Amino acid sequence: MTFWDASMPETTLPETTLREMTWRDIPALTALEPALFADDAWSERTWWAELAARPRRSYVVAEQSGTVVGYAGVDCGGEVADVMTIAVAQAAQGQGLGAVLMHWLITQARRAGAEHLMLEVRADNAVAQRLYSTTGFAKLSVRRKYYQPGDVDALIMRMHLWDMNTDPTEDPTEEVPR
């Protein structure tokens, strides 16, 4: 795999490249969104607005053989960063790409100096909840009937990115010589 960070989680993915998202990716993103998020899918207009919110917001796409198979974005606006989106195409699910994208989000938030990373997830999305929990997120609260239609609750989850003994710009997965 080719990545920005050398310390990515292990995966069973074929050659995958992470790169900065551009406006040229919008058609691929709007094609993936309905299959992955149904009623919660972002429109082309939403993607344009998200990309216009840089540099505060950062987005990445994962490509295999020139095809977008995943993407993620984070809003770094101070001590609390927010996951804006994370998605993996159905054909690439179950191979570790979600963990790689989550690692990228965490790294971006740490580099921006955030103390916490927050996200919201559908209460009926057990796969995403498992990824977030194993990554270090903890449930903070519930927003009742947040996702419409369907009156699905949103779980609000938070991860502490660093403590007083850790530099928030360092990658905590790197081994420190003893």
Image (cartoon, rainbow, N blue to C red):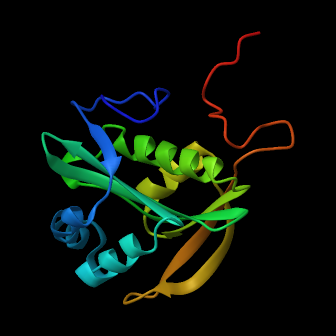
Describe residue 47's horizontal placement relative to residue 120 as left or right: left
Query: What residue is rendered at 45% in x and 56% in y?
Result: 128
* Image coords of residue 89 (percent x, y): 23, 54
Describe residue 97's horizontal placement relative to residue 28 as left or right: right
* Image coords of residue 140 (percent x, y): 70, 66
Q: Choose top left, top right, bottom left or bottom right for residue 30.
A: bottom left
Query: What residue is rendered at 71% in x and 43% in y?
Result: 168
Describe residue 72's horizontal placement relative to residue 175 as left or right: left
Q: Can residue 58 be seen in this view?
A: yes
Task: Spot the residue most to the top.
Answer: 178
Q: Can residue 40 be seen in this view?
A: no
Quadrant into which the C terminus falls: top right
* Image coords of residue 127 (percent x, y): 42, 54
* Image coords of residue 61 (percent x, y): 31, 52
Above or below, 121 against 152 in this view is above
Describe residue 100's horizontal placement relative to residue 17 as left or right: right
